[in-house]
Amino acid sequence: MFSDIVDLRNFYGSLLGRLAERSISLALSSVCPKSKNERVLGLGYTVPWLDRFKPDAERVLAFMPAAQGAVNWPAQGPSATALVFDEELPLFDSSIDRVIMVHALEHAENPRETLKEVWRVLAPGGRLVIVTPNRRGVWARFEHTPFGTGRPFSRGQLTELLRETNFTPGAWTEALHFPPSRRRWALRFYQLLEKAGRRFWPIFSGVIVVEAQKRLYQGLPVAQRVSRRVFVPVLAPQGATRSLSETSEPLSRSGA
């Protein structure tokens, strides 16, 4: 189940959310350096971190899962946001250089299918960066943050999942070493606890950050997938199809 877009926006507007954003930004800068003329895709809720790529990238897109909802981004200029299904991205093959996933993999209905779809849209040698709750961390145990919802992962689980979907894990790092307290006096020690946690208890971090590269040398046969989504017209009242079928049956008998 995805976190609601309203809850995500409210969280990152709070003091705890701004500190979490700062901690994750520091982790992303160590494994995800900016490059010029890249086509960057943010999948999930990546709005707080996409601005750092915009000046140097050729194009930056913000794709948000339909179950989560979407907000407009960027604040100025044409919107680069799209509401999508994470297993059926509206992009051509090999059209993206870098994908950043935050608040996405832990909520995916089928993580393997989601990563296979990401593999499809990534260019040869493309990079995938995943930020996901740490199974051993404290943040995954509190539901007042978006990291306490969904399916947390360990390093071993992420490694196995990436290899199964033809990615080679590379650089690893962690973020959110301070406790997710909502008390302002406790958050005053944010920098001290973050630095100490990065050094002494990285295994209990709130999130795991991994960069992986698209692997090409292990080819797998690609089978055509049938969409599991059923689209219902918005203006069609529920039960209309059933009522029509019930009324048409007596008519057909009377006509006979």
Image: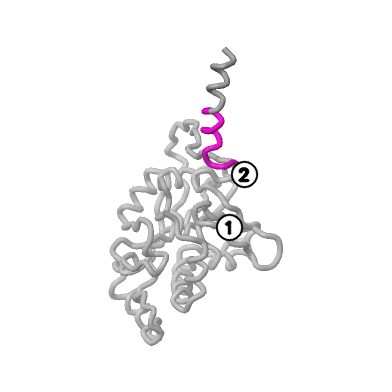
Indicate the quadrant where residue 78 lies: bottom right
Q: What's the mark number on residue 235?
A: 2
- Give the left or right position of residue 111, taking residue 90 as reference: left
Q: Amino acid at mark 1?
A: Ala
Q: CA distance from mark 2 to mark 1?
A: 28 Å
In magenta, the rendered stretch is: 236-246
Q: Residue at x 59, y 64 (%)?
A: 53
Neighbourhood count class around disc 2 (C-alpha, 10 Å): few under 14, some 14–19, many 20 upward: few
Q: Is residue 46 above or below residue 182?
A: above
Q: Is residue 135 magenta?
A: no
What is the quadrant of the C terminus in the image? top right
Please give left or right for residue 145 compared with residue 252 in the image: left
- In the image, residue 15 lies at what x, y percent? 47, 79
Helix, strand or loop at mark 2: loop
Q: Which amino acid lies under the numbered mark 2 shown in the image of this protein? A: Leu
Residue under pointer 1: 62
Is there CB contact under 8 Å for labels 2 and 1?
no
Q: Residue at x 44, y 43 (%)?
A: 113
